[in-house]
Image: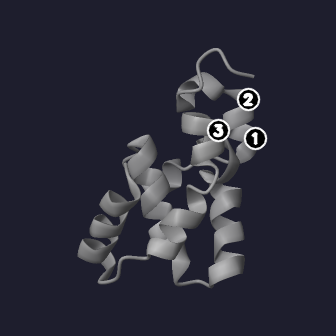
Amino acid sequence: MKTNEHCKKSLELFNEEGKEYHKWIDSYAEKFGWSHRKILHNKEGIEVGVMIFGEIARKHLQQHVKDDYKFKDYEDIPSIAEIKNDPESYGFIGED
């Protein structure tokens, strides 16, 4: 999803766009393309975002990752280790 789509969904769900959170979690997209998701689109990345922005960011970051990976629940968000151990399950086919 594009940043504006994430912001629209956040506005619908949480009554605020959370644009700064969405821009932050996708900050590596321009440099790494789709593979940017390996960096912050995981449990640890969400925790870093919460440390930076505060607890209010958690729901936006979780929803962002959930939507990008098309997960059903927040509990499905992987850790860095889970992505590294099984990259194909998260769409990283042929990558190490």
User: Would you identify the image quadrant in which residue 89 lies?
Assistant: top right
At mark 2, the secondary structure is helix
Determine the residue positioned at 33% across, 79% down: 14
Q: CA distance from mark 1 to mark 2?
A: 6 Å
Which label number is shown at residue 81?
A: 1
Q: Is residue 9 above or below residue 39?
A: below
At mark 3, the secondary structure is helix
- Closer to viewer: mark 2 or mark 3: 3
Determine the residue positioned at 45% across, 70% down: 60
User: Would you identify the image quadrant in which residue 35 lies?
Assistant: top right
Which label number is shown at residue 32?
A: 3
The percent coordinates of residue 19 (x first, y second) are 44, 73
Q: Nearer the viewer, residue 12 or 86?
A: 12
Give the crowd class for mark 1: few <14, some 14-19, many >=20 residues within 10 Å.
few
Horizontal side of 31 relative to 58 (left or right) equals right
Determine the residue positioned at 65% across, 42% down: 31
| Three-letter residue code for mark 3 | Phe
| Three-letter residue code for mark 2 | Asn
- To which residue does mark 2 refer? 85
Q: Is residue 63 above or below residue 95?
A: below
Q: CA distance from mark 2 to mark 3?
A: 20 Å
Q: Is residue 69 above or below residue 86?
A: below
At mark 1, the secondary structure is helix
Proximity of marks 1 and 2: CB atoms separated by less than 8 Å: yes
Which label number is shown at residue 12?
A: none
